[in-house]
Amino acid sequence: MKKLYSNKLVITSLILPGILVFIFAILAPICLSVYYGFTDYSGMGKAEWIGMENYQKLMHDSTFWKSLWHSLLLAVGFICIQHPLAMIVAAILDKLQGKAEGFFRCVYFIPNVISVAVIAYLWKFIYNPDFGLLNNILKAFGYTGKINWFDSKIAIWSVLVVLIWHGFGWGMLIYYTGIKNIDPVLYEAAAIDGANQRQTFLKITLPQMKSVIQVNVTMAIISALKQMETVYLLTNGGPGDSTQFTANYLYQQAFKAFKYGYGNAISVVFIIICILVTVVLNTIFAERAEKGKAVR
């Protein structure tokens, strides 16, 4: 077996398929995207080299910056609303026993199993100003007016509610798995020392979940940046550009406005932002980990 795995031909045959898939499915499209970002290509005909013109235009594109701002709002919503609630729910589920634990775990994850198209149209009905669930609930409490939840002034908040709700199950499941992997001996020792549930959560659960929190927060921010399907089906960035997100704006420019070169310029900037965010987050978490070790 050792002789077999030291054979260069065998090694090459094992890694070559993966390398080819990476080159043709990931690396080549990225390189083409970078190239087209420097052209005026419309998706048809010949691509003409225009240098940095697309990127200069992008720097002055108010819709692009607005879409980035909305992505930032969503990231803040994920980190400050969705994830704390997901962690608390995961900790509560961990305390449940028997069928109740499995039942509620499935209930919270159901929105992530349902098709994005179904979710979008479901929320369209919920937000409907004439017969929607939200307005009917308000009517039951005595409110007689009709609220247009997709009005340009409040549409972004309506969309953020849907996106935060829809991604809740993934965050909760990751935190739940992380809590399940914590050594029960730590909780038993805390119970013997007389620690209450709040002290146990703050002193044991949170410190043991640092790596899980790092992964979840990084994924949440990247997910906020590349949010597209739900927004496209729910509002398509409207009314106007009041609910525009970066990935949806990229799609509109590349495939609807036939500005394929400009759309690729947006995608290149988008990739750079994602890489920078990941590096910054990893640096922040690494520094905190080093400070924690120094304090100990």
Image (cartoon, rainbow, N blue to C red):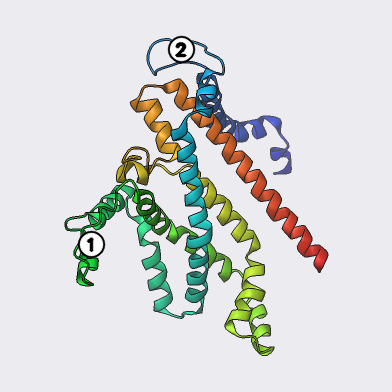
Question: At 54% from the left edge and 29% from the top edge, which residue is drawn?
Answer: 268
Q: Is the residue marked by circle 1 packed among few (<14), some (14-19), or many (20+) residues within 10 Å?
A: many
Task: Name the residue at 62% across, 79% down.
Answer: 200
Can residue 158 be seen in this snapshot?
yes
CB within 8 Å, label 1 to label 2:
no
Q: Position of residue 172 (x, y in %)?
A: 48, 64
Q: Nearer the viewer, mark 1 or mark 2?
A: 1
As shown in the figure, which amino acid type bears the numbered disc 1? Asn
Disc 2 residue type (three-letter): Ala
Q: Splitting the image into 4 quarters, where does residue 108 fall?
A: bottom left
| Quadrant of image for the N terminus | top right
Residue 106 at x, y = what percent? Answer: 38, 66
Residue behind mark 2: 47
Q: What is the number of the mark on residue 79?
A: none
Horizontally, is 54 left or right of 131 in the view? right
Callout 2: SS: loop
Q: Looking at the picture, how far across and down is residue 107, in whole percent?
A: 36, 67
Report the residue marked by disc 1.
Answer: 135
Q: Nearer the viewer, residue 257 or 274?
A: 257
Residue ID at (73%, 39%)? 3
Q: Which quarter shows the C terminus? A: bottom right
Cα–Cα gap, marks 1 and 2: 51 Å
